[in-house]
Amino acid sequence: MNTPSRPPRKQTWNPFKRPKLSRFTERRLSKVAVIDVGSNSVRLVIFDGAARSPAYFYNEKILCGLGEGLATRGTLNPEGRERALNAILRFKSLTKTMGIKHVIAAATAAVRSATDGVDFCHDVYKKTGQKIWIIDGLQEARFAAQGVLLGWPGAYGLVCDLGGSSMELAEIGGGDVLKTVTSNLGPLKLKDLEGGKTARDDLINKTLTSLAKELGPQNNRLFLVGGSWRALARIDMYRRDYPLNVLHEYRMTETSVLETLDFLRTTDEAKLQSDLGMSTARLSLLPYAGEVLTHLLTVFAPVDIAISSYGLREGMLYEQMTDDIRRRDPLIEAAKFAEKKDARVPGVGKSLLKFVSPLFPDASEDTMRIIAAACYLHDVSWRTHPDYRAQICFDNATRANLGGLTHSERVFLGLALMHRYSNKRSGKAFETLLQLLDPERMTQAEVLGKAMRLGAMMWVSDDQDRAHLEWDPNNKSLTLVLSEAAGSLYGEVAQGRLASLSSAMQAEASCRLSTC
């Protein structure tokens, strides 16, 4: 069997020589594979779908513990090294089977710090043919921040990426990554620090104070990236009995963080493992991550805290995008892609958006983008059994891997799509999630859903101007205006749907033929 030749010891390979997602066909549907060789885990993610808002075609993680004992030994954990090598061998086999030729692999703090890190990369290349790019701390900070920008195009604030052996901070604003800094405040290193909690507190405080001087004031939002932060957020959800089990865009306060750290100290570890499916390895590092976060909140005093499921791997994908793709709205791109792929009549969403827009004359820009997304998504679940369409629409919207959505916006979108197929929502399994919306927003979502339900009856293609709505909020008057060609479409079912819409709006409804 031929094995790849040994690459030069000096690392000059750069997988990002040009944007990969630049040609039209690649932009619309591409599979991009990323292997993330971290201090605690090795993960393969294969992105697929609309380039600006890709879906996770495949996602597998192996907890290898490459950085375990690194602080005292100076080399990678021998057992972890073997596990990581086997994991990458498996990942390469998987990508080959899937027909993915281009696989990007990057190693972070453990590999770059270990005296045998470069040798490990050479061994991987020899046995698997996969090159590994050892990224430095500032590059890691930039990629993590770009991952946040992939999920939140207009995000601003401070990104904190906590790995096993390092912690990176990056300032973001105006769609760009600004200042970046790196440190050795990883849980695996803190765990091995002599002197106990007193020594850890002293190191964390001194390090963060120094980083704060480099970054300057950072009192906006704090975005948390990394497995330890996501695990803490899951425990926070569990403690609060939070109704929506979606980590991305989950919000925490300083008080909530402190209460959850107390909860972690006093709750049986076996119960958390059982109820949340967390590994012993992950749980063992959370107290050290909690110490870092406590000091981080004191030093930077952020206005609020948001969890990002997007980080380094997504940032590496973002690196390959052209500026044109980066400027696009991930939510709208994903919704348009879903319509093109799954709707009965792709393109009707645009006509439907025009149809419902008169009902929301004072809607904010943020609300209008959710309304647009709902119109594009209104028919993508048509293959579901009719008795379950409303529930499936709600579940898909609230739990799908969509960027650019707060939790309340997820519920708003889900409720609107539910009402696309159902007039009523009482007695549904999702009622606990409605606590995330105020009554006014619930009514707005219901109006949108019922307007889509009516409008969907008026189009069988995307190039006909068949109907429009006229809304007079002062007189509470709603009029459905039909073209002469569409007059026959206004049958009993359409009449019932117009009545349901007008009832939700507390309006008087009528229908007339257009004189144009």
Image: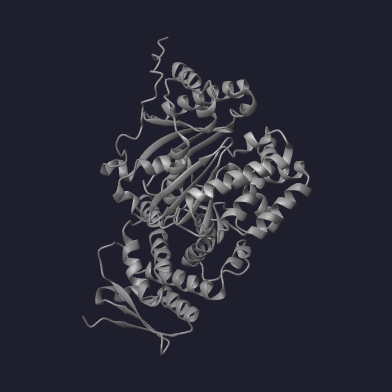
Q: In the rendered view of the protein, which quadrant contains the N terminus?
A: top left
Please give left or right for residue 242 compared with residue 409 in the image: right
Q: Residue at x 59, y 29 (%)?
A: 67
Q: Residue at x 50, y 25 (%)?
A: 88
- In this rendering, the answer to whether 245 lies above or below 369 is above
Front residue of 296 and 92: 296
Where does residue 513 sit, x and y in percent of width and height? 28, 81
Q: How many marks?
A: 0
- In this rendering, the answer to whether 434 lies above or below 178 is below
Front residue of 3 and 132: 132
* Residue farthest top in this picture: 1
Where does residue 315 sit, x and y in percent of width and height? 43, 43
Q: In the rendered view of the protein, which quadrant contains the C terminus?
A: bottom left
Q: Is residue 277 visible?
A: no
Please give left or right for residue 425 compared with residue 381 in the image: right
Where does residue 251 sit, x and y in percent of width and height? 58, 58
Please give left or right for residue 264 compared with residue 132 in the image: right
Where on the picture, by quarter, is residue 450? bottom left
Front residue of 391 and 292: 292
* Residue farthest bottom in this picture: 475
Q: Residue at x 78, y 45 (%)?
A: 268
Please give left or right for residue 370 compared with residue 302 in the image: left
- In this rendering, the answer to whether 319 lies above or below 483 is above
Where does residue 28 sit, x and y in percent of width and height? 32, 45
Q: Is residue 61 visible?
A: yes
